[in-house]
Image (cartoon, rainbow, N blue to C red):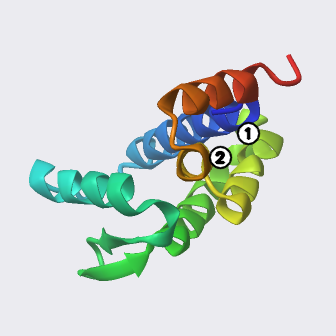
Amino acid sequence: MTPEETIAIAALFQAICARIYMLRNKNLNFIQYSRPLINENKWRASRYGLDGHLIDFGKEEEVNTRALIYELLDFLEPVIDHLGSRHRIEYVHKILENGTGADRQLAVFEERRSLTDVAKYISDSFLQGL
């Protein structure tokens, strides 16, 4: 929702791609899970946000979403400095601590009961500091 959050998420996806590429170059495979399983976690993430649980397919159990994100950050560690994006990815820790843009949007809606106010909040949040 903010430029910092947007850049952090972009850096996170860049690091995921670089890490998978690194594994592939080392001839290491990774498990590809079925679309319905992936969709289940997408739904859970959308519905429950950071406070929910996702399915850890390797463990075959539900795991706290934040714990899985920290595990992802550990997985990405080998490529972050090479990409020069450590300071950008560090912002993910702030998101985990302070909540997401969706959390803040819901709070605005709960307080004001106005989608117009939510849209204005989104716009103001993105433009702040630019």
Disc 1 marks which amino acid? Answer: His
- Indicate the amino acid at tag 2: Val
Residue 39 spot, x, y in % from top left? 20, 51
Quadrant into which the C terminus falls? top right
Identify the residue position indicated by label 2 in the image: 79
Q: Which is nearer the eye, 51 or 87?
A: 51
Q: On the rendered structure, is 25 left or right of 71? A: left
Q: Residue 74, relative to residue 129: is it above or below?
A: below
Q: Residue at x 30, y 61 (%)?
A: 44
Is residue 104 found left or right of 26 in the rendered image? right
Whether residue 69 is visible = yes
Residue hosting label 1 = 82
Q: Visible in this render: residue 32? A: no
Q: Is residue 70 above or below residue 86?
A: below
Q: Is residue 118 left or right of residue 26?
A: right
Residue count near mark 1 (Cα–Cα under 10 Å), binned few <14, some 14–19, many ≥20: few
- Crowd around label 2: few <14 · some 14–19 · many ≥20 (10 Å): some
Above or below 57: residue 83: above
Question: Which residue appears farthest toward the right when viewing the image?
Answer: 129
| SS type, badge 1 | helix
Which residue is depicted at the point 83% across and 43% down? Answer: 87
**Displayed quadrant of residue 25:** top left
Q: Nearer the viewer, residue 108 or 128?
A: 108
Q: Position of residue 55 (x, y in %)?
A: 29, 71
Residue at 76%, 40% in the rendered image? 88
Screen quadrant of the N terminus? top right
| Percent x, y of residue 111 | 61, 51
Quick check: marks 2 and 1 in contact, CB under 8 Å? yes
Q: Residue 28's image quarter?
A: bottom left
Q: CA distance from mark 2 to mark 1?
A: 5 Å
